[in-house]
Image: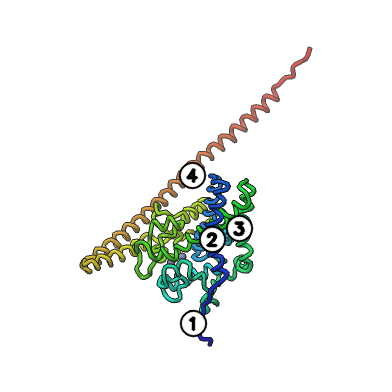
């Protein structure tokens, strides 16, 4: 059996190093130059923001919550859009991204975590991408995704698809709407890629650094509203690491989570289904446990806090059970009301039908009688 190679055997990934150095550099030089010579229009700003949103949502809704966590089902066309526009974000193929991400959840904060925060903020943010893959993990893949021909096709042709969608397509669209090809390449391509990438990279770095831990302290993930704004809703990272199957990261309706809202909109339109949600009971249980820990750490009586927490859990369970019972009874009542209403309507239609047949017979009989009695009028 081959011995695992040391992590120090990882070398500089020159392709990534060049890409992640040249794109910010090109953006920093070309974007101000373009604005200096051509001015900044609302059209260009809107174009940049739309490209940015498409790119980010393809990663957060597609690569992350759909492909990596399977937190909902989606229409094949939307799935295709995720793969297509996700390629243009220049964060790797779905297969590679999901492999790394699933390992991050499985091995969070350990040496096997591909972007462990314990190796430093910048390592978790970008440093890990600038190194070749750890030889110990190159054989690891997501077997479910490997069976998917479309995903394997994207993985195989990723550099070409990424270049086309990431640079050429924004240029083409910008040219078609009158902004100019190079405006598209600079703003919808290079600058958008830089901003979009760092927005995602913050999830691996700052989201394990800034904020609170309301649900678990068994890992470094944190919840932060500021980070949620910067990451399209992925900033509720403590919740996400605790309940990774949930399609939401911001669990309350007012939590800033455009990714969750997009998935909700797709579901409303019938383009997404089977949205996974963790029960309110499980969420509260985790939250209470963390709060209990903090109270005890602050000196509260362990027995008293535990009994109080138990009381809340039991009260919630009883309230939930009664609520479910009430819902069941209501639906039964509605069904019986609907049943009797239908029966009344059926009887009414039956009576009306008999009357209509009688009316028809009478009318026809009258018609026949009239025919018989009718005397032709003589023309003079
Ligand atoms: Zn994480
Ligand atoms: Zn995740």
Of the image marks 1 and 3, the number of the one nearer the N terminus: 1
Q: Are marks 4 and 1 in contact (CB under 8 Å)?
A: no
Q: Residue 105, labelled with which disc?
A: none
- Residue 93 position by quadrant: bottom right
Q: Position of residue 152 (x, y in %)?
A: 61, 68
The residue indicated by pointer 3 is 167
Q: Which residue is mark 4?
A: 342
Dot in front, 3 or 4: 3
What element does badge 2 sit on? helix
**Furthest-bottom residue in view?**
1
Q: Residue 25: which numbered mark, if any? A: 2
Q: Earlier in the sequence, mark 4 or mark 1?
A: 1
Identify which residue is drawn at 23% across, 69% down. 302
Residue 167 location, x and y as percent?
60, 58
Q: Which mark is residue 6?
A: 1
Q: Nearer the viewer, mark 2 or mark 4?
A: 2
**Element class at badge 1:** loop
The image quadrant where one finds the C terminus is top right
Of mark 3 and mark 4, the one earlier in the sequence is 3
Q: What's the CA distance linking mark 2 and mark 3?
A: 16 Å
The mark nearer the N terminus, 2 or 3, is: 2
Q: Are marks 1 and 3 in contact (CB under 8 Å)?
A: no
* Structural distance between the alpha carbons of marks 1 and 2: 33 Å
């Amino acid at each position: 059996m081959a011995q695992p190679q040391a992590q120090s055997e990882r070398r500089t990934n020159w392709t990534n190093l060049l890409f992640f150095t040249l794109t910010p550099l090109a953006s920093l030089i070309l974007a101000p130059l373009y604005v200096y010579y051509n001015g900044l229009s609302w059209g260009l700003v809107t174009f940049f923001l739309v490209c940015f949103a498409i790119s980010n949502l393809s990663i957060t809704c597609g690569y992350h919550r759909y492909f990596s966590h399977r937190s909902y089902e989606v229409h094949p066309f939307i799935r295709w859009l995720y793969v297509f526009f996700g390629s243009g974000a220049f964060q790797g193929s779905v297969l590679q991204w999901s492999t790394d991400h699933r390992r991050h959840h499985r091995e969070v904060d350990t040496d096997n975590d591909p972007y462990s925060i314990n190796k430093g903020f910048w390592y978790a943010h970008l440093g890990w991408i600038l190194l070749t893959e750890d030889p110990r993990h190159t054989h690891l893949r997501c077997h479910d995704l490997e069976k998917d021909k479309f995903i394997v096709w994207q993985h195989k042709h990723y550099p070409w698809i990424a270049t086309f969608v990431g640079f050429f397509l924004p240029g083409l669209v910008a040219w078609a709407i009158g902004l100019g090809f190079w405006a598209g390449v600079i703003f919808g391509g290079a600058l958008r890629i830089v901003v979009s990438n760092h927005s995602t990279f913050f999830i691996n770095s700052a989201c394990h650094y800034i904020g609170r831990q309301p649900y678990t302290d068994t890992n470094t993930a944190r919840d932060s509203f500021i980070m949620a704004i910067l990451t399209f809703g992925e900033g509720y990272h403590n919740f996400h690491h605790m309940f990774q199957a949930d399609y939401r990261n911001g669990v309350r309706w007012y939590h800033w989570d455009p990714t969750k809202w997009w998935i909700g909109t797709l579901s409303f339109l019938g383009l997404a289904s089977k949205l996974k949600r963790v029960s309110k009971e499980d969420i509260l249980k985790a939250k209470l446990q963390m709060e209990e820990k903090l109270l005890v750490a602050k000196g509260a009586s362990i027995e008293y806090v535990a009994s109080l927490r138990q009381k809340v859990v039991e009260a919630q369970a009883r309230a939930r059970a009664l609520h479910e019972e009430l819902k069941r009874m209501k639906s039964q009542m509605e069904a019986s009301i609907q049943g009797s209403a239908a029966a009344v309507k059926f009887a009414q239609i039956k009576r009306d039908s008999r009357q209509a047949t009688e009316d028809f017979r009478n009318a026809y009989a009258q018609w026949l009688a009239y025919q018989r009695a009718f005397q032709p009028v003589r023309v003079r």
